[in-house]
Amino acid sequence: MAEFDGIKEAHNKIPRGWVLFFVGVIVWLVWYIVSYTPQISGWSQYKVFEEEMKAAAVSTAGVAGENPYKNSAAAVEEGRALFASNCSMCHGADLKGGVGPDLTGRLKYGDDDGQMFTTVSEGRPGGMPAFGQQLGRERIWKVLAYVGSVRERGGRP
């Protein structure tokens, strides 16, 4: 025991729990550094991102293409009803626009079926919301069959 200015100082041991906690933190820190340092483990968020993008590309591979309901009168009628309840608020009942763009003219993100499907299902920046989960693949194609039929008639619903 050391004594300074009349105060006795005892050497107290560190509690065993604190020692175990300290050693545990050091072990965890070494594991974390080894696991997530790209130069050591090869792990990278960029690799994870690239894998997710490849998986997304595979899942949407069948989306692009021609509308399977293009020449179906029943699908066009169902698409008309779906358009009226989901799209006409922005694009107008006559598809001539309003808040959203005129669908009878040239479209900013593409005029073919695949590009229009992507626009409706995923949305676009600046106002077009995504309807993929709300409508689903089949109903989006039916809405696009209706829009395509109006476009073929020169913009007359």
Image (cartoon, grey):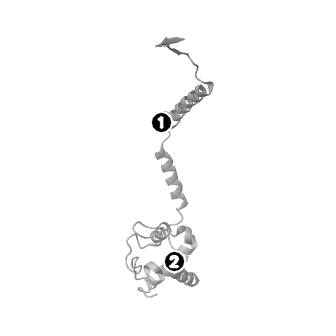
Q: Is residue 5 above or below residue 46?
A: above
Residue 152 lies, in percent from the top left, at 44, 83
Mark 1: amino acid: Thr
Q: Nearer the viewer, residue 44 or 28?
A: 28
Tell me where residue 91 sits by quadrant: bottom left
Q: Residue reaching furthest front?
A: 6
Where is residue 10 drawn, in percent x and y? 55, 16
How far is disc 1 from disc 2 in space, using C-alphas?
A: 48 Å
How many numbered marks, from 0 up? 2
Mark yes or no: residue 78 visible: yes
The residue under the point 47% across, 37% down is 38
Residue 86 marker: 2
Q: Position of residue 26 (x, y in %)?
A: 54, 29
Element on which disc 2 rests: helix
- Kindly identify which numbered label has been placed on residue 37: 1
The N terminus sits in image quarter: top right
**Of 142 and 131, which appears nearest the observer?**
131
Residue at left 37%, top 71%? 108
SS for dot 1: loop
